[in-house]
Amino acid sequence: MEQLTSSVLLIDDHPMLRSGVKQLITSIADFEVIGEAGDGITGIALAKQSEPDIILLDINLRDMSGLDILLHLREQGVSSRILIFTVSDDKQDIITALKNGADGYLLKDMEPENLIESLKQVIAGKIMMDDNISQIILNHMRGQPHALEQSHDVNLLTPRELEIFNLLVQGLSNKLIARQLNIVDSTVKVHVKNILKKLNFKSRMEIAVWYLNSR
């Protein structure tokens, strides 16, 4: 079976950290760093141009907040899995990241092997967070069940979108969905963007938490 390579974009203003993370990621056969940026403007441009499978995004950049970059990319329909990779464990940063469409929240003091494992799990469709952070996020989402129920109407989806939605909540990545449905990755990306827009979600994280709460 042909091995699928997952693309990664690094957005962080610390050159040494980017270099170390890039070296770590490229040491794994099924990952490829396709770009890196030390500022928000360059990062946004690269993200829109390449729409990588994963974006590792720091919160504290010199020219703008990573949280603002995250929101902008989601508003522009970028469907990459976006992981916040930061030193901040501030509750407000975590909640804002979720609201703005993050697919995970990782702290920079994690072990290198845990970062690689997190990337693998994200590609497999999982939501990746530090254990303490995950509880904050889940509590926040569960505190708004009525708002969630009112804003996410699955009946708005076309039959094909519903088919892809059902695969999304099973944790499949775009590549795996494309393979299962015998369509190309770009078609899946378009459908995922439409699903997020129609159901008023900013990320797969929100879809997953809503789905778990509604079962």
Image (spheres, rainbow, N blue to C red):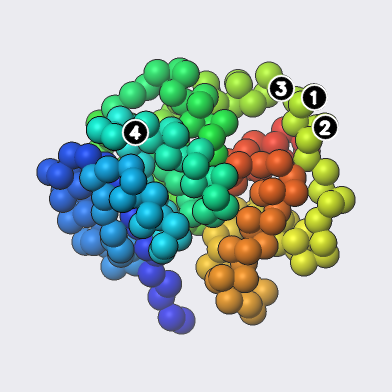
Between marks 1 and 4 in the image, the one whose residue lies nearer the viewer? 4
Percent x, y of residue 184: 58, 76
Q: How far apart are marks 2 and 4 (CA)?
A: 33 Å
Q: Categorize mark 3 by other alpha carbons within 10 Å: few (<14), some (14-19), many (20+).
A: few
Kindly tell me whether residue 52 is visible in this rendering: yes
Residue at 38% x, 69% y is 5
Kindly tell me whether residue 119 is visible in this rendering: no
- Mark 1, residue position: 146
- Mark 3, residue position: 144
Query: The residue under label 4 is which amino acid type?
Result: Met
Find out whether the residues at labels 1 and 3 contact each other: C-beta distance under 8 Å: yes
Q: Is residue 192 left or right of residue 28?
A: right
* Occupied quadrant, residue 17: top left
Residue toward you, 150 or 130: 150
Q: What element carries label 1?
A: helix
- Mark 2, residue position: 150
**Which of the two discs, 2 and 3, labels the residue nearer the N terminus?**
3
Residue lying furthest right:
155
- Mark 4, residue position: 64
Query: The residue under label 3 is which amino acid type?
Result: Gln
| Mark sitting on residue 195 | none
Percent x, y of residue 190: 63, 64
Residue toward you, 39 or 121: 39
Q: Distance between the residues labelled 2 and 3?
A: 10 Å
